[in-house]
Amino acid sequence: MRRFVLPLAAALAATPAAAAEVSIQVQGPVAEITATETVQSEPDQATVGAGVTNRAPTAVQAMRDNAAKMERVLARLASLGIPRRDVQTSGVNLNPQYRYSNTAPPVFLGYDVTNQVSVILRDVDKVGPTLDALVAAGANNVNGPFFSRDDDKAQRAAAREAAFKSAEEQARAYARMAGFAGIRLLAVEETLQRGGPIPFDVMNREAIVVTGAAKDTPIEPGRVGTTIQLTAKYEMTR
C-alpha cells in the first residue's frame, strides 16, 4: 500500500492560513490530468483608457494645464451618462523631458504630464461614439477597448463541466491502457482565465475627430472566452 499526499486546495482556497495537506492511501498508479476548456460568449461591457498628455516649461504649469484639460474630459464622460463609479484614475505621471545629442549637453524641453482614467462602458454599442467624444473633448491618449463580461458565472460553469468531463475521460483511457478497470478521483485544482480581448488603440487624434458628416469610429466587439483549466489526480483501480 502506498501513501499519496495531496494539498487540500479546494476546501481551503478561501482561508488565509497555510495550505494544509491530507494523506490519501492509494493501491494503484496515480494519473495526473490537465484539461482546458473555453466557452465563448458575447461581451456585455468594455473598458477604455482615456487621458491627457501635455508639456509646459515648469512642473507647476504642466500640472495646471493638464488639470484643466482633464476636467473637460471628465465632464464629457459625465455628460454621456457614465456614472462616476465606472471611472477610475489609473495613473498620473510627471517627467522632465530632454533632447540628447552626441556632441552637446542635454537640452531641457519641459515637463510632460499624463493623467489617465480607466472607464467601464456598459453598452458596447456606444464604444465608438464614446471614443470620438473623448478625443473631441481633449483626450489625446486613448487605448482600448478591452471587451469582457460583467457576469460570466454561466460560462464558467459550462467550461468547468466540460473540463472535468474531459479530464475524467482521459484518466479512464489511461487506466484501460494500463490494464485497470476504473479510476478514483483524488484531487482537483482549478485555474480560471478570462478571455483575452483584442485592444483597439487610438494613436492619432486628428484621425477620429467628429465633424459634421464623419462617422463614428467603427468598433467590433466580437466574442470573449472564459477558460477553465483543471488539474485532476486519479488513482487507477482494479
Image: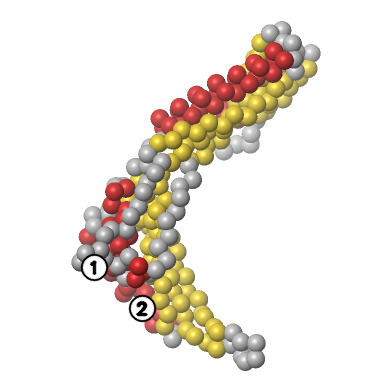
Query: In this image, 224 relative to 25: left or right?
Result: left
Looking at the image, the residue that sits furthest to the left is 212
User: What quarter of the picture does the N terminus occupy?
Assistant: top right
How far from the left and from the top, in percent, is residue 87? 34, 56
Label 2 environment density (alpha carbons within 10 Å; few <14, some 14–19, many ≥20): some
Q: Secondary structure at mark 1?
A: loop
Location of mark 2 (residue): 64
Looking at the image, the residue that sits furthest to the front is 213
How far from the left and from the top, in percent, is residue 59? 44, 81
Q: Using the rendered view, name the quadrant where residue 155 is placed.
A: top left
Query: In this image, 144 relative to 124: left or right?
Result: right
Q: Amino acid at mark 1?
A: Thr
Q: Is residue 109 above or below residue 184?
A: below
Q: Earlier in the sequence, mark 2 or mark 1?
A: 2
User: What quarter of the picture does the C terminus occupy?
Assistant: top right
Q: Is residue 107 above or below residue 236?
A: below
Q: Residue at x 72, y 10 (%)?
A: 180
Q: Amino acid at mark 2?
A: Arg
How far from the left and from the top, in percent, is residue 108? 52, 87
Q: Residue at x 61, y 90 (%)?
A: 105
Q: Residue at x 57, y 23 (%)?
A: 166
In space, the residues marked 2 and 1 are separated at their CA atoms by 29 Å
Q: Nearer the viewer, mark 2 or mark 1?
A: 1
Disc number for residue 166: none
Q: Using the rendered view, name the quadrant where residue 17 is placed.
A: top right
Q: Residue at x 21, y 64 (%)?
A: 213
Disc number for residue 211: 1
The answer to whether any part of residue 206 appears in the image is yes
How far from the left and from the top, in percent, is residue 30? 72, 20
Q: Nearer the viewer, residue 19 or 208?
A: 208
The answer to whether any part of residue 75 appears in the image is no
Query: In this image, 238 relative to 87: left or right?
Result: right
